[in-house]
Every structure is written in C-alpha cells, then in structure tokens.
Image (spheres, grey):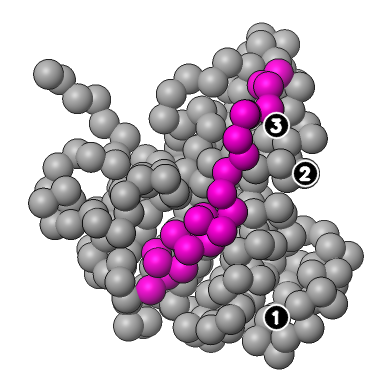
Amino acid sequence: MKILISGATGGIGSEITKYLLKNNKIVAIARDLGRLKKLKDEIDSENLDIMTVDVSSKESVEQCFSQIKTLDVLINCAAILGPVCLFGQSDLEKWRETLDIGLMGTVYMTYFALPLLQKSRKGKIINFSGGGSASPRIYHSAYGTAKTGVVRFSETVAAEYPNLDINVIAPGAYKTNMWKDETHDKEPENWGDMDGLKRFVEFMCSKKSDGLTGRFIHYKDDWQNINNNVLKKDMFTLRRIEK
C-alpha cells in the first residue's frame, strides 16, 4: 500500500511511520526539512519518501498532492497544542494557528487526497483526535476545539463518501515533544501503549477494517471486535444521546 502521513516527524507520527514501513510505501510530510532528513537517515529505506509541507497552507498541500500519483491511506497526525490558559487570556493568533494546523490541515489534506483515494481498492483516511474532543478540557480551548472539529468533519465526510473508510483515532497520552508545551495537566500515572497504538493503526489501514467508517475510536477500545451491529448504533461517535 501507499500511505501518506502528515506530522511524520512528531512523537506519534514518526513511530507510526517506522512501523508501517515494514510492508508499505510511505510518504512522510512535515514542515521541518531538517527533522524529515533526520527521519530519513534513521530509517534508510527506499520505501520512504519525504516532503516538506505546511498543512495549514492550502497552496502547500495542493502542491504536495500534485506530485503524488497514487494513494491508498491518508493518516493525519499533524497538530500543535496551542495556548494552555483560560480562553480569555489566550493569544488569539496562536489560538487560530492551532485550528489552522490541527483542523484545517486535516481538511486540506483530506480534500486533495479524495480523488486519489477513490481510485484505490478501498481508500482509507485515519485522523487523530483525543484530549478535549470527547469531553471539555480546561485551559485547552484551542486544541479541544480543533480536535472536536476533526471528529465531526470526519463523520460528515465518511457519510458523504461511503466508498471510503474514514475514521478518527484517540491515541492516548505519550511523552512526546507536544507534552513539553503542557503547563497545566499533570503527567498521567501510565503513559499510552505505543506498541498497542501501532497495531491499531495497522489494523485500520488493512483489509480487516474494511467497512468500519465514521467512527471515533480510542486505541484501548475493543477495536478488533467492532461489528456491523455496533456500526448501526451511535457508539464510537460524537452524539448527544437521550436516555
């Protein structure tokens, strides 16, 4: 398969890139060319191509896809934490930058990937969400808003393109570079299981997940046993449920 990964030099993105290279061809994109070259040197695989792209720029993303001829899976990892403070104390330019990268970056990548993915056997999009999207997370209004937007955007596009599988992953917490920007939340007692997350992403890329779409799934959920009965319900979605 041919897989494109945004945010490929990040803590999670780089781990997923290295793991999926076992059996796939990867296009790894990020803003920092130096970090991309470092990733390329670490892996040293002919199956890895790197490309400098600013996902918050429509023009940059469009230029990226003008150079890609085929694609089976798009994985959107790019995000920044943004302002960590009361909303009223936020730097609004940084607040908007958080949405530009975390939400609009996912929108731009998806928009230009759609024509290629629809030519694949079963095109798949895997978006990342999490902290602040399933429930309020104080002092993280920008990040939570961006990530919640990713969930509803993914659900909507999944409904519009039933021939594709479009889902959202909540990956758990990891001590990555993003965590260095965290000034409010305490470190969790237990960090996420990176090996478990990588197996989950591999499953979502594979034929085993065909037909699973429009869902928001935590890597600790029983994802291997999600069946058609579950898919007919509002489980693993962003919904208001009345009892």
Q: Which residue is mark 3?
A: 82
Give the number of the mark in front: 1 or 2: 2
**Considering the numbered disc 3 on the image, is that residue within a helix, a strand or a loop?**
loop
Helix, strand, or loop for circle 2?
helix
Q: Which residues are magenta?
A: 184-206
> Which residue is rendered at x = 23% and y = 40% of the image?
235
Q: Secondary structure at mark 1?
A: strand
Task: Answer above or below: position of 44 versus 166.
Answer: below
- Dividing the picture into quadrants, the one containing residue 177 is top right
* Numbered badge on residue 177: 2
> In the displayed image of the protein, which residue is found farthest to the right?
34
Pinpoint residue 240: horizontal percent, then vertical percent: 24, 25
Q: Residue furthest front?
A: 189
Mark 1 Cα shell of 10 Å, populated few (<14), some (14-19), many (≥20): some
What's the residue at 82%, 74% (across, down)? 42
Taking the image as shown, residue 44 lies to the left or right of residue 163, namely right
Q: Are marks 3 and 2 in contact (CB under 8 Å)?
A: no
Position in image of residue 4 (x %, y %): 57, 71
Q: Is residue 78 above or below residue 46?
A: above
In this rendered view, identify the residue nearer to me: 20 or 215: 20
Percent coordinates x, y for residue 21 in the rendering: 61, 78
Circle 1: residue type: Asp
Label 2 packing within 10 angstroms: few (<14), some (14-19), many (20+): few
Residue 111 in view (yes/no):
no
Q: Is residue 201 magenta?
A: yes
Q: Quadrant of residue 96?
A: top right
Of residues 175 and 234, the one nearer the viewer is 175
Task: Tell me what residue is drawn at x 57 percent, y 73 percent.
Answer: 20
